[in-house]
Amino acid sequence: MRIFTESQHFKQWFFHLLVLGSLAIMIYAFYAINYTDETISTTEKYIVNSILIVSAIPLLLIYRTKLSTRIDEKGVHYRMFPFHFKMKLIQWNELEVCEIRTYNPLSEYSGWGYRMSFSNSGKALNIAGKKGIQLKYKNGKKLLIGTQLADEAQRTINYYFKKTTS
């Protein structure tokens, strides 16, 4: 039995710089408001601290984003935490097309992450790179799942998808 698995995280240096830099600014603001500025009232401190904490939560969730992909005899499984808590399965018989393709993340999907296209490209779940598993459902919907292991994914797709569509 062939099984393809892949797990990806954001690894780009500029992404880490942006998230960690934002968190550092929030921590500094928290410290400055609570321990150095005595002119701010308790209510104002509570409001500002609440805003800082609420702002930090999405940053931490984005920082922990993980794209997991599995291809096996049942179909293509995927999960992009924190958007999906459980693996989602697309069965082979639901698909018209399943192939690896090169794409342009910026022009087709306006970047990386959980993306929706304004053109006819459908949705994309991607972390890095320009290769993806292009899925086209029999109902016409499209989903692209980014991969860093395109050759390995293609071999597994060829093994299962060709069997189920013939």
Image (cartoon, rainbow, N blue to C red):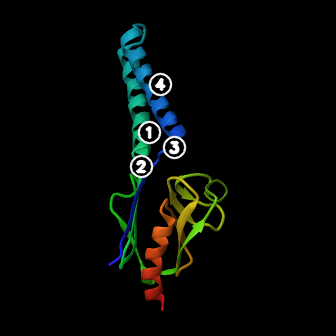
| Mark 2 in CB contact with mark 4 (< 8 angstroms) | no
> Residue 86's image quarter?
bottom left
User: In the structure shown, which secondary structural element does the residue marked by tag 3 occupy?
Assistant: loop
In this view of the protein, which residue sits in the foreground, 153 or 32? 153
Judge left or right: residue 147 versus residue 35. Answer: right
Residue 61 vs residue 159, the one in the foreground: 159
Amino acid on which disc 2 is placed:
Thr
> What residue is pinned by disc 3?
12
Dot 2 or dot 4, earlier in sequence: 4
Badge 1: how crowded within 10 Å, few (<14), some, or many (20+)? some
Which residue is disc 1 drawn over? 59
Q: Position of residue 123 (x, y in %)?
A: 54, 63
**Which of the two discs, 1 and 2, labels the residue nearer the N terminus?**
1
Residue 138, percent from left and from top: 52, 82
The label on residue 25 is: 4
Looking at the image, is mark 4 or mark 3 earlier in the sequence?
3
Q: What residue do we see at 67% from left, 56% from top?
A: 107
Q: Tell me the element at label 4.
A: helix
Q: Position of residue 48 (x, y in %)?
A: 42, 24
Q: Are marks 3 and 1 in contact (CB under 8 Å)?
A: no
Residue 146 image label:
none
Point out which mark residue 65 bears: 2
Locate residue 101, reporting x and y percent: 58, 68
